Image (cartoon, rainbow, N blue to C red):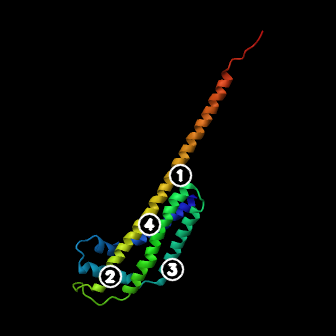
Amino acid sequence: MGVRAGVVVCITSFLLGSLFTHWIADSLTLWKSPVTDEHLWTAALYYSILTKGPVQILYVLFGIIILGGTTIFWSFNDLEAGNLMFDGGSIFLYGVAVIMYAYSVIPNLMDQFTTIPPYHMKDAFPRLLRTPTLDLASNHLVCSVALTGVLILQAGRWWAELSDGDDDEEYFSEKVEDSNAVEDTKSMTPLVTTA
């Protein structure tokens, strides 16, 4: 089970890191106020560069996503109480991130940013691209928060299992001490001899 949890944490961390690379564009549109045309052009150019990358990168990304989902489901299949709670929540959050990315981010990128109109940084940003640019940034944020939730749930599962293990050790050590005390009292009983 430790290997499965390690695989889930590594894959989730990798996916989270790949989402953090979009911070270059997302920070300009989500966290800098007011959002200027220059910020939107920078973000749109970044997203346009992403669409021109080799398609094999997407295949590798999908393979990693499938491996992560399979590992969480495999761990969930143990049907232990901790797995049902922590892995069930992880499956939900992982699924939210995957669905959001597959049905919102990728189609938005491919539909809107494969070609952007020629521009200068001081030109007005096209209204048709404003909403998709802001949507991409907010969708990346939703995916990042969901994957962070997966990491938190996996850490919580590890901590709960660690705590359960400590309780079991204390219980067994108390039982051993109690049985040793009973044996000691039996050996201390005076022998009654009749003369």
Looking at the image, is mark 2 or mark 1 earlier in the sequence?
2
Looking at the image, is mark 3 or mark 4 earlier in the sequence?
3
Give the Cα separation between the discs numbered 1 and 3. Answer: 35 Å
Looking at the image, is mark 1 or mark 3 earlier in the sequence?
3
Residue 125 vertical placement versus 18 (above, below): below
Identified at 64% across, 28% down, the residue is: 182
Q: Residues within 10 Å of mark 4 (few under 14, many from 20)?
A: many
Question: What amino acid type is highlighted by mark number 1?
Answer: Glu
Give how far across and how far down residue 70 sits, in percent: 56, 69
Question: What amino acid type is highlighted by mark number 3?
Answer: Tyr
Of circles 1 and 3, the one toward us is 1
Q: On the image, numbered disc 1 is attached to which residue?
A: 161
Kindly give the residue lying farthest to the top in the view shown. Answer: 195
Q: On the image, numbered disc 3 is attached to which residue?
A: 59
Viewer-side residue, 26 vs 90: 90
Question: What amino acid type is highlighted by mark number 4?
Answer: Leu
